[in-house]
Amino acid sequence: MGRRWIFDGHIAGIGTTSGLRAVVGMWQESPFGTFSDVMVQEPSGHRLLLAPSADVAGFIASTYSFDEVRMVDVAAGLSGGALAVDAGPLAIQAVTGARTYLGSALKALPRRLAVHPRWLSAVSPLAALAARGARTYGTAGSGRAEFYGVTDLHHVTSAVVSWEGADAGALAPIRPAVTFGFSSVPPKPSVARVRTTVLEA
C-alpha cells in the first residue's frame, strides 16, 4: 500500500421530502486540518460537492464521484444535540436524539478494533445487512481503498433544510441511496462518529 489519509470526526445523513439528500462531513482531525464539507444529491440525481478549499475539493473529488464541485464557505457543527450547517446554497438546522441500537452495539466495541481496516474489510457484508446501503469497505476513485469505522450513531429527529433559498421539505428517509461512492449513509437520518481511512494502492 502507498499513502494513507485518516479523517476523524462525524458524518450526518439528511433526507427531505423533496428528494434532496445531504451528507455532511465534520472533521476534527484530517490531513487538511479541521474542516467540514457537504455532498448533496438533488432529486434529479445531480451530485454536488460543497467544499471549503481547493485542496479539500481536489482530494474529495478524486475519491468520490460528482457532477459539479463548488467551493464555498462551509460551517457545520454539533453542539448540545443540535446540528447546524451553513454551506453556500444549503442550510440545515437539525436536532439529534437517542443513540440507535446499532450505535449501542458499535460503542461497545473497542475503538482500536472498530476502526481497523482489516476488521472493517471483514465485517462489510454484515454492515450492509445492519444498515441497508451502508458499507464499511470498498474501492474509491484514483485507485484508492476506503474504510469507514463507525463507533457511535444517533438518530436525527427533526430538521429544517433549505436549498438555494427554498424550503427543501420535511425530514425524510435518505431514499434512494446517495451515489457518491461505494457506500451510502443509513436510510434513516442520523449522525455517526466515524474514522475514515483512505489508502492508496
Image (cartoon, rainbow, N blue to C red):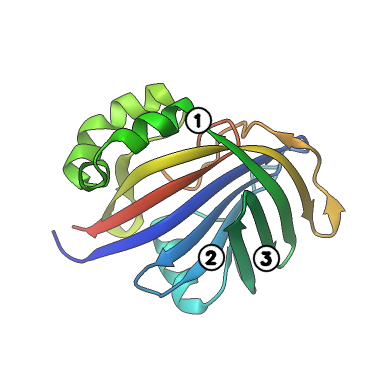
Q: Are marks 2 and 3 in contact (CB under 8 Å)?
A: yes
Q: For the point 41% across and 75% down, which residue is it?
A: 33
Name the amino acid, label 3.
Ala
Disc 2 vs disc 1: which is toward the camera?
1
Q: Amino acid at mark 1?
A: Thr
In the current view of this chain or complex, which residue is farthest to the front? 80
Labels 1 and 3 touching (C-beta < 8 A)? no
Numbered label attached to residue 27? none
Mark 3 — residue?
87
Label 1 vs label 3, nearer the camera:
1
Q: Nearer the viewer, residue 101 or 178?
A: 101
SS of the residue under disc 1: loop
**From the viewer's perspective, is 120 left or right of 44?**
left
In the image, residue 155 above or below residue 4:
above
Q: Position of residue 63 (x, y in %)?
A: 39, 58
Q: Secondary structure at mark 3?
A: strand
Q: Residues within 10 Å of mark 1 (few under 14, many from 20)?
A: some
* 18 to the left or right of 3: right
159 or 58: nearer the viewer? 159
Residue 150's place in the image compared with 24, above or below, is above
Q: How many marks?
A: 3
Mark 2 → mark 1, Cα distance in angstroms: 24 Å
Q: Which residue is mark 1?
A: 100
Circle 2 residue:
36
Give the Cα separation between the discs numbered 1 and 3.
27 Å
Q: Quadrant of the N terminus?
A: bottom left
Please tell me which residue lies in front, 3 or 120. 120
Work out how far the residue at label 2 is from the one at label 3, CA to CA, in angstroms.
Answer: 9 Å
Which element type, helix, strand or loop, lies under badge 2? Answer: strand
Compared to residue 81, the image places residue 177 above or below, namely: above
Give the residue displayed 30% in from the left and 41% down from the top.
137
